[in-house]
Amino acid sequence: MLSIENLTRTEKLRMMEVLWDDLSRDSETLSSPEWHAQALKDTERALTENQTHFVSWDTAKKVLRDTTRTR
């Protein structure tokens, strides 16, 4: 069996795409957990009440990278 460590990044991404395509084919059996629905409701409420805001994807990536570097 081929070890995942020996795959290139492109091969790994392709493998993820193939897996996702296969899993999403039967979307009726793929349901979100209840906590996810609650998280979406909480976020929508926070936005409505101006308690949170969106940031650009570039800003979010920078924040995440900076956070992981300081740990």
Image (cartoon, helix red, strand yellow):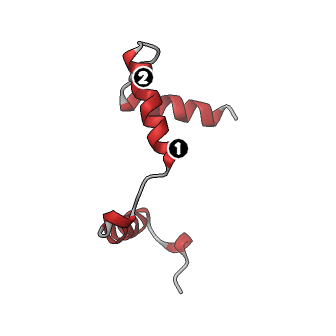
Q: Residues within 10 Å of mark 1 (few under 14, many from 20)?
A: few
Helix, strand or loop under label 2: helix
User: Given contact means CB atoms under 8 Å apart, are the residues at marks 1 and 2 in contact?
Assistant: no
Residue 36 location (% of width, % of height): 48, 44
- The residue most toward the right is 71
The tag earlier along the polypeptide, 1 or 2, is 1
Res 44 seen here: yes
| Residue in the image at 47% along x and 71% along y | 7
Q: Amino acid at mark 2?
A: Arg
Q: Amino acid at mark 1?
A: Trp
Residue 22 location (% of width, % of height): 34, 72
Residue 32 location (% of width, % of height): 43, 52
| Residue in the image at 48% along x and 36% along y | 39
Q: Residues within 10 Å of mark 2 (few under 14, many from 20)?
A: few
Residue, disc 1: 35
Along the viewing direction, whichever of 53 and 1 lies nearer the viewer: 53
Residue, disc 2: 45
